[in-house]
Structure formats: C-alpha cells, structure tokens
Image (spheres, rainbow, N blue to C red):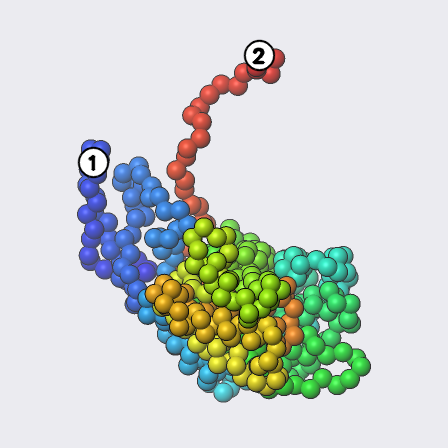
Amino acid sequence: MSSEHKGVHKATVSFSDGTPAIELPILKGASGPEVIDIRKLYGQTGKFTYDPGFLSTASCNSSITYIDGDKGELLYRGYPIDQLATQCDFLETCYLILYGELPNPAQKSDFVHRVTHHTMVHEQLQFFLRGFRRDAHPMAVMTGLAGALSAFYPDSMNLNDPHQREISAIRLIAKMPTLVAMAYKYSVGEPFVYPQNNLSYTANFMRMMFATPCEEYKVNDVLVRAMDRIFILHADHEQNASTSTVRLCASSGTNPFAAIAAGVACLWGPAHGGANEACLTMLNEIQANGGVAKIGEFIANVKDKNSTVRLMGFGHRVYKNYDPRAKLMRDTCHEVLNELGLQDDPLFKLAMALEKIALEDEYFVSRKLYPNVDFYSGIVQRAIGIPVQLFTAIFALARTVGWIAQLNEMITDPEYKIGRPRQLYQGAIARTVTPIAQRG
C-alpha cells in the first residue's frame, strides 16, 4: 500500500527487554490480510524481524494478482481466473496483466500485431544454441537463451526508460515461444521452424514445436485451446519464488532480459516450476511398477508415515481449498484425451484412477489433497506430445508476462528500493588471525 493510502490504525509493539514500546502503522489493502508497516522498526528499536521464507512478510505493494488460498480464488487485475480462461485468449490476458484493463477490439488488434511481428529471433541465436549438448535440460538452455537476448537487443535494456521497457516486454512475450520451440527442435535433431504471422500466438507455438518440412502442419483447435489455457493459468501467481527473484534482480537496475533469465533459473527448481515434471515422473514410476493394478499399494505407501513415497501433483502450498486452476485444467484434460482418443492409454487411465481416489478417499479429502494444476497440465502436455523435460520451459513461457508486469510495477513504485534482506547472524564473533605456522 503506497504511503498516501495508509490507514490510521496503529499496532503497539511492546518489548520485555526494556526497549520502549513503539507504534507501527497498520495498512489495509483492497483484499487480504492487513499489514503492519515495520519500515521504521530498526531505526526506532535497533531490531529486525525474523521471517525465514518471508511467509509473513509483504515485500511490496501490488495491484496485479490476488490469491485467497482459503477460498480457492485467483484474480488477475480483479478478474476471476475461470472467466479469463473461458472467455479470453492468452494475449488478451497478457494485455490485462501488463496494462490493467482488458483490451477493446482495436487495442487487442494492435497488441496482437506488435507481438506477432516480434516473434522471430536474431539468426545468430541458432549458433549460440548449437553450443549446447543435444541432451541438455531445456531449462539449462532457456536460462542461457533468455539471458543472451540482452546481447542481441541492446536498444531495449534500460529499465528506467518506459519506452525501452515496453519494447523489451513485447520482445520477451513474442520470442519466448520461439526460443522454447527452438530448444525442443534442437534436442530432437529436427530443423528449426520459423514463426508464421497468420497464426495465433498459441497456434504458432504448436506449429513451431511439431511441424516438419515433410508436410503441411494442420492446426488442431482443441489442442491449441488447451495450450492457450495452460498459458493463461500460469501467467502470474502473486509473489512466488520466481516472481520475487525477478523483482529482486531488477531492483538492482539490471536489464529486463537478465531479470527474466533469473526468473527462469528460479522456476527450474522442483519445488516450484518443476512440480508438473515431478508429477509425470511419479505416474511413470507407478506405471512401471504395475500400473492401475498396483495403485492401492501406492496409496497405502503414501498414507504410511514411515514410507518415503511422495504424492506429487496433489495439494498446494497456497490453496487450502481446491486449486481454481485445477478445475479448469480438469475439463481441458478430458477434452484433450477425448479429442486424441487416449482415454484407454495405460498412463492416462492410471492418472484418472488416481484422480478418482484423491477426490473420494477420506484421507485425501480431509487433508484437502486435491489434484492441482500441475497434475492436469502435465497430463495434457504429455497427451499433446510435449516431452516431460520441456514442461517447465513452457511454464516459463507463460509466466514471462507476469514477471514483466511485476518488474514494471516495481520500477514505477515511488517506494521502490534495491532489495536488501537482513539476517540473524549466528557465526563466530570477531577474532584475530593466527599466523599459519602457529595453527595446530
């Protein structure tokens, strides 16, 4: 909450060590918990707060995304995610996240045109890509490619210039699908496919992924819509680890491409963007150990406190109710399986059996271990033909718009400062160096 919006309520903080009590302002946002403003705490008391993982700390004020984990609610700029995913396409959602309002027809047409005509990447990037091993993890490649953009587009690197920020935003949104598709094609030894301006953003991505020079690529609207929905559902998610990384990185004044590369690197972690990859790995392991016939044994191990077996793709750190994105992906999942005739595929039958148990078994229901968005999006992507290792790169593609919007919001916030967390030091106190000959 900006200083001009501060509330009049105060919190009185008293201390048992003789430090005089102080009053701290309580700020109220549009939604969500009130926030105690502790900015003057150190100056007035010489004390910091201690909050590992920042689980009780608001690091910024933001008007982009709001999550209510207890209600299972996700809003982009105030719009419920289910309305956006069913009534808008990804580029409309990008426009909303970047500019705060849904576009009218003229605004959408202009935005789509600008993005479409920035989808090609510098030809030299092909040679940069060829420096990687063919079996490199796509996220290793994407971390390099995203950072490398700053070497190719030096005219849009100044974070403090709104015009340059605008150009870099369009470039990043436009080029990420091209880079992800190039990373995939390189890994399988197929020729790169250039973007085609008469296709939609997501259809273009699908074509760059799966077309070959051998035959004309036919766009499947059901699959394109499914992928578009995956993009929408992953476009932003408040101050998560990768978003906080982008903000912290950009707070130093580095260029947008470098900040986004930092976000890509953070997203790679299995506890963050790698969750849908871990979910498919789990399904493959169950399948290899007997499939549906052995699912009861797997569930028993999940419930056993002494077992090391973990259930991936169920529950969520933020959503204590059903993940609102999962409801939408569940419908999409069944549409895609029906479209491709994969209802009887052993792995997908296993996934649906696991879903049924999780939605009905008292153990899972009482703990609210519902299938999350990673569970369904992983199944959808595998059905479409996307290799498991590429899942997180596609997540990065979708999240790029959220990262950019958060970065822009921070840079234009009059209260913004370079990020500088403090610490509770537990190391050695000051000591004197002993000459090496005297050290035992």
At 29% from the left and 56% from the top, the residue drawn is: 35
Q: Residue 1, how many percent across, how many down?
A: 32, 60
Q: Position of residue 48 (x, y in %)?
A: 33, 41
Residue 81 percent location from the top left of the image: 42, 76
At 44% from the left edge and 79% from the top edge, which residue is drawn?
Answer: 84
The residue depicted at 30 percent of the width and 37 percent of the height is 46
**In the displayed structure image, the side of residue 405 where residue 78 appears, left or right:** left
In the image, 306 versus 387, the foreground residue is 306
Mark 2: amino acid: Gln
Amino acid bearing label 1: Ser
Q: Is 115 placed above or below 130 here?
A: below
**Quadrant of the rendering where the C terminus is positioned:** top right
Vertical side of 149 occupied by 88: above or below: below
Pointer 1 residue: 16
**How many marks are shown on the rendered structure?**
2
Residue depicted at x 68% and y 79%: 207
Residue 28 drawn at (x, y percent): 26, 62
Question: Would residue 36 be found to the left or right of residue 204 on screen?
Answer: left
Q: Regarding mark 1 in the picture, which secondary structure is present there?
A: loop
Nearer-the-camera pick, 163 or 420? 420
For label 2, the residue is: 438
Mark 1 vs mark 2: which is more N-terminal? 1
Seen as rendered, the residue at the extreme right is 214
Q: Is residue 253 above or below residue 396?
A: above
